Image (cartoon, rainbow, N blue to C red):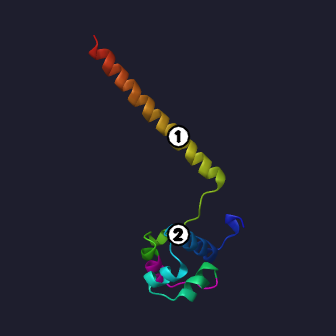
Amino acid sequence: MRIEEQNIRDILASNIKENRKKCGFSQEKLAEKAGISTPFVAMIEVSRKFPTPDVLERIAGALNIKTYQLFAVPPSPEEAMEQLRRDIVSEIKQTVGESVAIAVKVALAQR
């Protein structure tokens, strides 16, 4: 399914499941930590139920993330590659700048 075709329930379901797995939690463990039932977690993760704002906050807290992150849409592969390119270019510029500064300092010290 393309991101543009996902609805809010699908985005929420995917993010909860992904973050739950990153934490190493079973649905049962997440339910316990968030104070909800395991079947409710399962229903949320398959987009059959939508939690209240209070429950969203408890789920996010259990997953150690901010509530808004439950609704984050991952970047497209193109956007991710562009961000990676920008990060690499920035790192190269910083490294080169630091190297030049050190070289100039050494050269001036040798005078």
Above or below, comparing residue 15 to residue 105 in the picture: below
Q: Nearer the viewer, mark 1 or mark 2?
A: 2
Neighbour tally class for label 2: few under 14, some 14-19, many 20 plus, Cα within 10 Å: some
Res. 54 visible in picture: no
Q: Residue at x 72, y 67 (%)?
A: 1
Q: Residue at x 65, y 50 (%)?
A: 78
For the image, the number of numbered tags is 2
The dot on residue 19 is 2
Q: Is residue 95 shown in magenta?
A: no
Q: Residue at x 64, y 80 (%)?
A: 46
* Image-based side of 98 in relation to 37, left or right: left
Is label 2 in a helix, a strand or a loop? helix
- The image quarter containing residue 97 is top left
Can you identify the residue that label 1 sits on?
A: 88
Above or below, comparing residue 31 to residue 83 in the picture: below
In the image, residue 23 lies at what x, y percent? Answer: 48, 69
Q: Residue at x 40, y 24 (%)?
A: 100
* Image-based side of 106 in relation to 97, left or right: left
Distance from label 1 to label 2 (Cα)?
27 Å
Residue type at the position of mark 1: Ile
In the image, residue 62 lies at what x, y percent? Answer: 44, 76
Res. 34 visible in picture: yes
In the image, residue 14 lies at what x, y percent? Answer: 60, 71
Residue most toward the top?
Answer: 111
Neighbour tally class for label 1: few under 14, some 14-19, many 20 plus, Cα within 10 Å: few
Q: Is residue 55 shown in magenta?
A: yes
Residue type at the position of mark 2: Asn
Find the magenta span and give its range.
Answer: 48-59
Q: Quadrant of the C terminus?
A: top left
- The image quarter containing residue 35 is bottom left
